[in-house]
Image (spheres, helix red, strand yellow):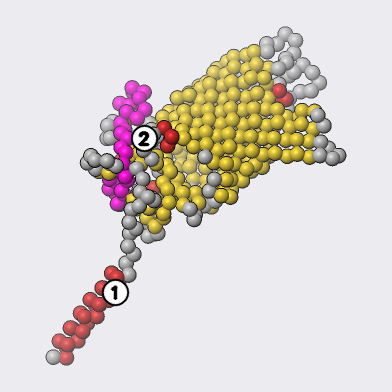
């Protein structure tokens, strides 16, 4: 009899313990105007999904700021706003490659996003039936409805240095970056201008424009259909150097805090020099080879390092090969403002002589501190 009572009491306490544990289990947040994400650690994040490319999600939290999240670390997504989701339809990508039609095996679906484990659901905002896909079919996504306004973002950076007294000096640097991103492609435009004057003597006046357009062929490959680079720098004897090319690229690394891609292909270059030695041509045209690489590494939730590098090979009479390096340390001060410290290095193996005693140097360095405003 005592054994029977002991068993009953044991079962009673086990049930009580189980019930208490269930009562303390955390509840999932309800969907609202915010986007909710649950990580493998069990933590819930509240904020806004901005974009996801190469399995890297750009997520903005009012408290934590800008976050870069690895898609593999996310187990639940409940979006409070419509998302444009680029889905692989399962068609053979090889057919798309042969036809040179990027996105030929993809479909963009718009609606509220629900992710549970390996299952993805897209629920239309108004009417229609929900669509269900495998997690591995998600290539990229962009927040918002398919409206042109939702595709664009921009950043304007300004740095100045003014000195008066024993030395009168004024420096001005401006950098404008504009980007259009959709689930299938992205367009990038950047202008960098640098002007400096000391005692009414101009010591710097250079302008650089970079632009390219990418089609996402798959999660790992992209086609840079057009790449444009323009440079004007009288102090390097360059009045107009315009390079136009096309290339194919590959995402080398796209996990966690690091995103890194590389691309390469042929190009055509037009160069107009300010002055040349007697008998030399001021205008030169030739074919080139172009290699580009870009990376972004998230040091902390508010500190990023961004690098953009280009290598261009040309004939010796056109200046030889040149290398452009632009590395920026971005510190988020506010959700819309960054403090940027940039180191820019330009190298040219065989700068063309001006025919004077003042010859262009092979190396050109700039260290710039500026404030950036994001839109």
The residue shown at (54%, 51%) is 302
* Rendering coords of residue 288 (x, y %): 55, 20
The stretch drawn in magenta includes residue 100: yes
Dividing the picture into quarters, in which one does residue 133 lie? top left
Q: Is residue 310 visible?
A: no
Dividing the picture into quarters, in which one does residue 103 lie? top left
Other residues around mark 2 within 10 Å, as few (<14) / some (14–19) / many (≥20): some
Give above or below for 173 relative to 4. Answer: above
Other residues around mark 1 within 10 Å, as few (<14) / some (14–19) / many (≥20): few
Q: Are marks 1 and 2 in contact (CB under 8 Å)?
A: no
Q: Which residue is mark 2?
A: 146
Identify the magenta region: 95-122
What's the CA distance linking mark 1 and mark 2? 47 Å
Q: Is residue 113 visible?
A: yes
Q: Earlier in the sequence, mark 1 or mark 2?
A: 1
* Rendering coords of residue 215 (x, y %): 41, 29
Residue 111 located left or right of residue 185: left
Q: Residue furthest left?
A: 1
The residue shown at (44%, 48%) is 59
Give above or below for 291 relative to 113. Answer: above
Dividing the picture into quarters, in which one does residue 347 lie? top right
Instruction: Between label 1 and label 2, give the one nearer the viewer.
Output: 2
* Rendering coords of residue 342 (x, y %): 63, 40
Q: Which residue is mark 1?
A: 20
The stretch drawn in magenta includes residue 97: yes
Give above or below for 280 relative to 69. Answer: above
């Amino acid at each position: 009899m005592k054994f029977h009572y002991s068993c009953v009491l044991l079962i009673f306490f086990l049930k009580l313990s189980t019930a208490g544990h269930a009562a303390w289990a955390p509840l999932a947040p309800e969907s609202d105007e915010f986007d909710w994400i649950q990580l493998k650690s069990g933590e819930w994040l509240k904020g806004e999904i901005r974009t996801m490319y190469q399995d890297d999600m750009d997520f903005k939290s009012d408290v934590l700021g800008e976050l870069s999240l690895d898609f593999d670390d996310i187990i639940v997504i409940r979006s409070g706003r419509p998302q444009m989701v680029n889905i692989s339809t399962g068609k053979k990508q090889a057919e798309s490659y042969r036809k040179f039609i990027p996105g030929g095996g993809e479909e963009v679906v718009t609606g509220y996003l629900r992710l549970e484990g390996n299952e993805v659901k897209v629920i239309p905002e108004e009417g229609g039936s929900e669509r269900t896909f495998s997690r591995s079919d998600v290539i990229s996504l962009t927040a918002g409805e398919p409206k042109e306004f939702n595709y664009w973002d921009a950043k304007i950076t300004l740095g100045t240095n003014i000195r008066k007294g024993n030395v009168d000096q004024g420096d001005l640097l401006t950098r404008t970056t504009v980007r259009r991103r959709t689930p299938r492609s992205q367009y990038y435009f950047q202008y960098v201008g640098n002007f400096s004057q000391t005692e009414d003597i101009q010591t710097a006046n250079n302008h650089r424009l970079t632009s390219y357009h990418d089609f996402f062929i798959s999660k790992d490959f992209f086609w840079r259909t057009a790449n444009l680079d323009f440079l004007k720098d009288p102090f390097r004897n360059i009045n107009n150097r315009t390079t136009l090319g096309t290339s194919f690229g590959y995402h080398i690394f796209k996990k966690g805090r690091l995103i890194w891609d590389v691309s390469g292909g042929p190009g055509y270059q037009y160069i107009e020099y300010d002055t040349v030695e007697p008998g030399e041509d001021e205008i030169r045209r030739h074919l080139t080879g172009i290699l580009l690489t870009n990376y972004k590494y998230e040091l902390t939730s508010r500190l990023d390092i961004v690098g953009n590098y280009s290598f261009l090979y040309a004939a010796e009479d056109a200046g030889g090969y040149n290398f452009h390096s632009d590395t920026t340390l971005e510190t988020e001060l506010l959700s819309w403002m960054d403090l940027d410290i940039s180191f820019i290095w330009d190298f040219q193996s065989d700068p063309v002589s001006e025919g004077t005693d003042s010859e262009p140097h092979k190396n050109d360095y700039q260290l710039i501190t500026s404030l950036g405003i994001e839109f």
